[in-house]
Image (tube, rainbow, N blue to C red):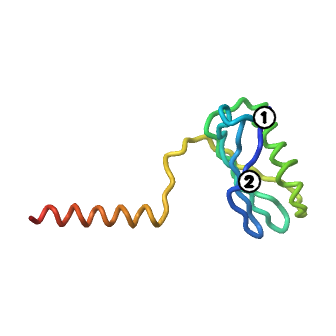
Amino acid sequence: MEDIHFERHFRTPYSEGYYIMQGNNLQSNNRLGTVDIHFTTTAVHGTLILERELEEADLTKLIEQIDEDLVLSADMPRDDFLVSVYVGKDVGFYSDEFFAEESNEAALDFGADEG
């Protein structure tokens, strides 16, 4: 695939997560999906989540590029690279802060109903 690059968003001793971006300039730079890579003693497991469907040929090229750019460059021994692929959409980002704010708003709404 053309104009693909990876932006790391987390790293642990045995896992990495990347945004998959397509485009070279800020105006056309958009996210194609994400990939999480988990290194075990014998294999590397990948979870590829695409935000739009790709033709089979483009999908296999993308997986090969992930293997070449991210997996092989990690210098971790492996017997196989196993990839699960999903197509979906981003519906939101949730954290403890989100739930704390939601809980506070619910408590305020509950108190307003009593008066």
- Amino acid carrying label 1: it is Asp
Q: Is residue 105 left or right of residue 48?
A: left
- Disc 1 crowd rating (10 Å Cα; few below 14, some 14-19, many 20+) is few
Residue at the image position 54 percent from the left and 45 percent from the top? 90
* Quadrant in the rendering for residue 40: bottom right
- Amino acid carrying label 2: it is Gly
Residue that carries the numbered disc 1 in the rendered image: 3
Task: Estimate the x, y position of residue 12 in percent, counting from the top left.
Answer: 73, 68
Q: Is residue 89 left or right of residue 44?
A: left
* Residue extending farthest front: 26
Please, what secondary structure does the residue beneath circle 1 have? loop
**Location of residue 89 with respect to 9 vertically, above or below:** above
Task: Estimate the x, y position of residue 6 in percent, counting from the top left.
Answer: 75, 47
Residue at the image position 90 percent from the left and 61 percent from the top? 75
* Quadrant in the rendering for residue 108: bottom left
| Label 2, label 1: how far apart the Cα atoms are | 21 Å
Task: Estimate the x, y position of residue 53 in percent, counting from the top left.
Answer: 64, 33
Quarter of the picture holding the N terminus: top right
N-terminal label among 2 and 1: 1
